[in-house]
C-alpha cells in the first residue's frame, strides 16, 4: 500500500471506527458486546478496502480498459468479502449488537465521503 491517499483513507476509517466503538460502549447496556460489534463493523469496511487497493492499484500504468477492468474486479472482490465478513459476524459472534455492528460499519464507510470532502 504505497499510495498515501489510500493510507490516509484507511487511517480515517480506523479513527471513525474507534469513535464508533467509544460511542457504542458509552450508549449501550452491554458495553463490551456493543464495542466489539462496532469494531467488527468497522473491520468489515477496512479489510475489503485494503484488498480493493491491492487489486485495483497493482499496476499504475496501462491501457484504460485494463485499469478499469482491475477496478471492476477489485470492487467485486470487495463486495463479496464484505458479504462474507458480515455473514461470519452473524454466524460466529453470538452476543452481537446489531446496532453496534451497523454503527461501526456506517462510521467506517462514511470515511469515503469525508475523504472526498477534505483535500488532505
Image: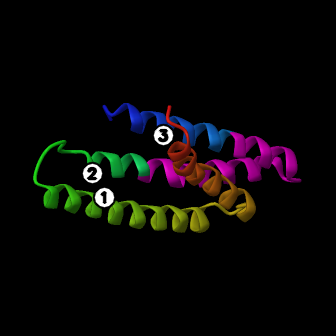
The magenta-colored residue range is: 19-48
- Badge 1 element: helix
**Quarter of the image where the N terminus is located:** top left
The CA distance from mark 3 to mark 1 is 17 Å
The CA distance from mark 3 to mark 2 is 15 Å
Of the pair 68 and 81, the residue shown nearer to us:
68
Coordinates of residue 117 in the picture (x, y in percent): 55, 44
The CA distance from mark 1 to mark 2 is 5 Å
The residue pinned by badge 2 equals: 56
Q: Residue 58 in magenta?
A: no
Of the pair 30 and 11, the residue shown nearer to us:
11
- Badge 3 element: helix
Left or right of 56, for residue 92 = right
The residue shown at (66%, 61%) is 102
Is there CB contact under 8 Å for labels 1 and 2? yes
| Extreme residue toward the left, this view | 63
Q: Name the dominant secondary structure of the magenta segment.
A: helix
The residue shown at (33%, 66%) is 76
Could you say which quadrant of the image residue 73 lies in?
Answer: bottom left
Of the pair 33 and 26, the residue shown nearer to us:
26
The residue pinned by badge 3 equals: 9
The residue pinned by badge 1 equals: 74
- Badge 2 element: helix
Of the two numbered discs 3 and 1 on the same chain, state the one appearing first in sequence. 3
Left or right of 28, for residue 65 = left
Coordinates of residue 36 in the picture (x, y in percent): 68, 49
Of the two numbered discs 1 and 2 on the same chain, state the one appearing first in sequence. 2
Amino acid at each position: 500500500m504505497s499510495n498515501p491517499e489510500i493510507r490516509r483513507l484507511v487511517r480515517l476509517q480506523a479513527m471513525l471506527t474507534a469513535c464508533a466503538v467509544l460511542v457504542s460502549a458509552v450508549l449501550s447496556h452491554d458495553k463490551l458486546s456493543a464495542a466489539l460489534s462496532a469494531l467488527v463493523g468497522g473491520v468489515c469496511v477496512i479489510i475489503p478496502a485494503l484488498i480493493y487497493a491491492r487489486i485495483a492499484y497493482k499496476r499504475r500504468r496501462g491501457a484504460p480498459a485494463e485499469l478499469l477492468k482491475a477496478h471492476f474486479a477489485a470492487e467485486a472482490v470487495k463486495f463479496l468479502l464484505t458479504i462474507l465478513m458480515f455473514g461470519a459476524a452473524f454466524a460466529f459472534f453470538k452476543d452481537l449488537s446489531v446496532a453496534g455492528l451497523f454503527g461501526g460499519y456506517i462510521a467506517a464507510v462514511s470515511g469515503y465521503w469525508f475523504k472526498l470532502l477534505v483535500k488532505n
